[in-house]
Image: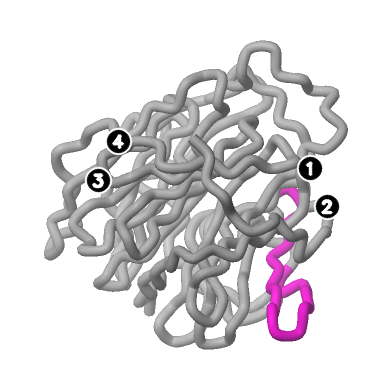
Amino acid sequence: MSRSVSPIEIVADSHDRCGEAPIWDAQRQRLVWTDIESGLVFEYLPAAGQKSILNQGLTVSGIALNRTGELVFGGAGGLHLWKGQGHYRTIVAEHKGMPMCFNDIIADPRGRIYGGTIYWGPNGMERRGDLYLIDGNGEARIVDEGVELANGLGFSGDNRTLYFADSAARCIYAYDVEADSGALFRKRVFVRVPPDEGIPDGLTVDREGFVWCALWYGAQIVRYDPGGTVERRVRFPVTQVSSLAFGGKDLTELFVTSASEPWRSHLAPPGFNFNWPDFGGELFRIRLQIQGKSEHLADLK
């Protein structure tokens, strides 16, 4: 199913090798995102149409906003509280002797961070990862385990449900959330993505409770209703669509990241063309009549 949408605009063409983790910073009216493979974090100011580098030299895969104005970075070296170029403090880097290689992260209503870990090498998965909950003081605990390829995270409007994409399993899972403890219960499959549609990557939830997900290899983003049924598809001119976030003054602009460096994996759809002329690398924007919701702020000390 496809619905009419406004044209897809390119707002930044930096040829990101792996553009990911977009998040809207309402206080500064900017979008922040990362190019994982290049070790760069960018900001885009829509009012000025200006893109600039915020940080370089640190591998960042996931980003959250902290209540005190800093950014929270998750990546191969753990979870960090970032204050400026070269100025960051590592909150947590290992758990019971295991290095924590984070991919996507998200803050919950109480300022804690959920983050999934990944352990992939040139030959695929080296070991399964976990889904962690990190308190403001840096104490970490596992809330789910056995994750193949941790990716997008998003909360329902009432914060009672957490959505989590495991790309290698081709599933978006849903959990019930216990607000006080942050524990997750009643894990179930929200969406199972067919092999020929790509794999679920970054996701976000709009104000109506619909889940938007970028399908890597699939050249599309998909909006699912609260029951997991496809409500619409938005096709893209690039195949490696990676993540998405609502932004703009009224949160009706959907920013979408992509990746220029082809990822040759067994997860590609049957017959996928690795000689495709344009895998991605641009930051896109779509103006919608649908409103997103603000992400929660972390409260790391």
Q: Earlier in the sequence, mark 3 or mark 2?
A: 2
Circle 1 packing at 10 Å, graded few (<14), some (14-19), many (20+), is many
Q: Earlier in the sequence, mark 3 or mark 1?
A: 3
Q: Amino acid at mark 1?
A: Ser
Residue 239 in the image: x percent, y percent? 70, 35
- In the picture, the quarter occupied by the C terminus is bottom left
Q: State left or right for residue 273 relative to residue 127.
A: right
Q: Which residue is mark 1?
A: 260
Circle 2 packing at 10 Å, graded few (<14), some (14-19), many (20+), is some
Are dots 2 and 4 in contact, CB under 8 Å? no
Residue 221 in the image: x percent, y percent? 55, 43
Callout 1: SS:
loop
Q: Which residue sits at x=45%, y=64%?
A: 290
- Residue range corresponding to the magenta coloring: 37-55
Are dots 1 and 2 in contact, CB under 8 Å? yes
Distance in Å between CA atoms under marks 2 and 4: 33 Å
Q: Which residue sits at x=58%, y=74%?
A: 88
Distance in Å between CA atoms under marks 3 and 2: 36 Å
Answer whether residue 89 is visible to the viewer in this image. Answer: no
Q: Residue furthest top?
A: 271
Distance in Å between CA atoms under marks 1 and 2: 6 Å
Q: Which residue sits at x=61%, y=31%?
A: 218
Q: Amino acid at mark 2?
A: His
Callout 2: SS:
loop
Which dot marks residue 15?
A: 2
Are dots 4 and 1 in contact, CB under 8 Å? no
Q: Which residue is mark 3?
A: 143
150 shown above or below 292: above
